[in-house]
């Protein structure tokens, strides 16, 4: 069988066990084929399809069609963190210039999205973050990829024109403006959309905000400048981070959520209590275990209050809804969705069930190798790492599966003049019983122990060296002496006990 025939067969098969054949097979259908593909074709004299005939029939014909994108070999749908880090990886492999196109619904080049609920919301006198200061990849110490960076690297950017449909057979995508895009390899990096209140209970009233992009944050800042009474719905990341920023605005702030304590998906009650006390010291009020019936409007139609199911009402001229997010699967349902965790199902190299189509970042449901379960992670660290792993697998002989260690963090109260800055990091899995060490002045550590093994660890206000220890502990899962941890007189002592367990396991 000729090399060309084998490559063509690979392009029509399911996910290939040979990533090089898989990748090059897909490239046959791209308007711009790689030099290695040209060499393969030219060195196949026994093939019934010569190089010139093949190129004329499939490549030239495609490039002469009325496609809106010039760069067609690789197309990334979505312009968030994952897209920005994927772009950097394409550049590092020398495969971006004239080959890569990014199509996004936003008006901006990819940026570090966590800033939107942190430094971006600071008042003007507190030196808020602004673009171009937090374009990717500054969040990981990399180069600031401004719009000019993409131009210089030969990457085609299509702004404010989200993809609304794809034709898998024709390898095309259609945007909301009607543009038809051609792709050889497609990477879906659409992230998530904010979960919203229904319109019938006031979810779209003026003064009600959701935060997913710069436009959302700008709209919120405009309201904060005039606000007096702020209500935040949700006790997770967004609730904690926005409330901390609101303290700098000196607003009457109330957080409402149905759970028993802040960050219930991660924090044990005793840890949550420490953070709640800190927020209360800064004037933030909590209404816990509450369900919202509807948002009420004033005579001018602007939000005026939040009405709870128990009949009570909390006045508000600005409301922020932070109740989670949904994977933006949009037109990609045919790729195969995961019904348990949501998102697009992928394998350990971020390949979907359709050859030549990948999914990365928040939208991807991937095998969490170290815990042997499927997961979908909404976090910037995973967005970065999944993008890099996917592109490396796509462009090289790299075949290892993604081996991700769950990592979460938050940094709040970091504006000028804040009496206390908060920075915690968590690594691992929050399963089993918890052991808490420290008094939050300023440090506190929580260890999750399951069947004698250290599964997860959270540290507040650690030193750089202490933070560096956390992933080692969570990855190795050493056997630890619970009684020693429980009797530790300080966070430093507890970490040394955990470190010794790590060394004993070697």
Image (tube, rainbow, N blue to C red):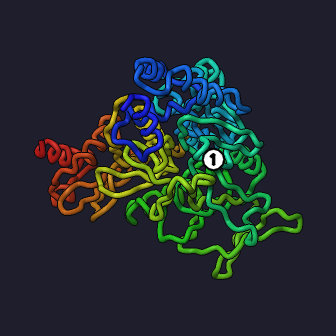
Specify whether 317 is left or right of 137: right
Report if residue 305 is visible in the image. yes
In this rendering, would 101 be left or right of 270? Answer: right
Q: Is residue 310 left or right of residue 385?
A: right
Residue 388: image quadrant is top left
Quarter residue 227 falls in: bottom right
Q: Circle 1 — which element? A: strand
Q: Residue at x 38, y 63 (%)?
A: 268
Q: Where is residue 476 in the image (x, y as percent from the top left)?
A: 22, 46
**Residue 303: image x %, image y %?**
78, 64
Q: Nearer the viewer, residue 258 or 62?
A: 62
Task: Point out the residue furthest to the right here.
Answer: 300
Residue 171: x and y, percent?
59, 41
Q: Residue at x 34, y 30 (%)?
A: 397
For the question of whether residue 277 can be seen, the reply is no
Considering depth in this image, is 86 or 107 the residue closer to the camera? 86
- In the rendered image, which residue does mark 1 sit on? 166
Number of numbered discs: 1
Query: In percent of the image, x 40 and y 66: which residue is there?
Result: 269
Badge 1: residue crowd in 10 Å (few <14, some 14–19, many ≥20): some
* Quarter that holds the N terminus: top left
What residue do we see at 64% from left, 51% from top?
211
Residue 54 in the figure: left or right of residue 122: left
- Outermost residue on the bottom side: it is 310
Q: In which quarter of the image is the C terminus?
A: top left
Along the line of sight, which residue is nearer the eye, 48 or 492?
Answer: 48
Q: Where is residue 72 in the image (x, y as percent from the top left)?
A: 61, 30
């Amino acid at each position: 069988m000729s090399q060309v025939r084998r490559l063509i067969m690979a392009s029509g098969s399911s996910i290939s066990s040979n990533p090089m054949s898989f990748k090059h097979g897909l490239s046959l259908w791209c308007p711009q084929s790689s030099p290695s593909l040209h060499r393969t074709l030219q060195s196949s004299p026994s093939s019934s399809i010569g190089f010139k005939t093949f190129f004329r029939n499939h490549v030239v014909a495609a490039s002469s069609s009325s496609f809106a994108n010039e760069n067609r070999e690789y197309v990334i749908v979505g312009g968030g963190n994952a897209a920005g880090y994927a772009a950097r990886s394409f550049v590092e492999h020398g495969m971006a210039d004239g080959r890569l196109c990014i199509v996004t619904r936003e008006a901006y080049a990819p940026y570090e999205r966590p800033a939107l609920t942190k430094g971006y919301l600071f008042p003007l006198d507190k030196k808020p973050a602004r673009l171009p200061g937090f374009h990717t990849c500054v969040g990981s110490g990399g180069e600031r990829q401004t719009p000019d960076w993409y131009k210089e690297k030969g990457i085609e950017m299509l702004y404010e024109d989200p993809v609304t449909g794809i034709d898998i057979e024709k390898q095309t995508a259609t945007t909301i403006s009607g543009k038809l895009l051609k792709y050889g390899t497609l990477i879906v990096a659409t992230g998530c959309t904010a979960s919203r209140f229904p319109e019938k209970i006031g979810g779209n009233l003026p003064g009600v905000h959701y935060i997913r992009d710069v436009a959302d944050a700008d709209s919120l800042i405009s309201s904060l400048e005039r606000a007096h009474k702020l209500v935040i719905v949700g006790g997770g990341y967004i609730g904690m981070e926005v409330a901390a920023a609101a303290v700098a605005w000196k607003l009457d702030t109330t957080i409402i959520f149905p759970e028993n304590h802040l960050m219930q998906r991660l924090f044990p009650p005793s840890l949550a209590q420490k953070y709640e006390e800190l927020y209360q010291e800064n004037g933030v009020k909590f209404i816990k275990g509450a369900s919202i019936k509807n948002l009420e409007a004033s005579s001018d139609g602007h939000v005026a209050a939040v009405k709870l199911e128990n009949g009570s009402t909390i006045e508000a001229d600005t409301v922020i809804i932070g109740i989670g997010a949904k994977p933006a699967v949009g037109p990609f349902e045919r790729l195969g969705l995961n019904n348990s965790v949501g998102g697009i199902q992928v394998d350990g190299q971020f390949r979907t069930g359709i050859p030549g189509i990948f999914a990365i970042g928040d939208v991807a449901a991937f095998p969490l190798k170290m815990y042997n379960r499927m997961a979908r992670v909404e976090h910037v660290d995973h967005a970065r790492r999944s993008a890099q792993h996917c592109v490396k697998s796509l462009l090289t002989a790299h075949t290892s599966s993604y081996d991700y260690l769950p990592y979460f963090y938050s940094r709040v109260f970091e504006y000028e003049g804040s009496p206390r800055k908060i920075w915690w990091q968590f690594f691992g899995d929050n399963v089993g019983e918890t052991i808490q060490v420290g008094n939050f002045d300023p440090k506190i550590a929580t260890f999750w122990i399951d069947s004698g093994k250290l599964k997860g660890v959270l540290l507040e206000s650690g030193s750089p060296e202490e933070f560096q220890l956390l992933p080692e502990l969570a990855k190795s899962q050493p056997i630890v002496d619970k009684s020693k941890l429980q009797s530790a007189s300080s966070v430093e002592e507890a970490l040394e006990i955990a470190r010794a367990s790590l060394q004993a396991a070697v």
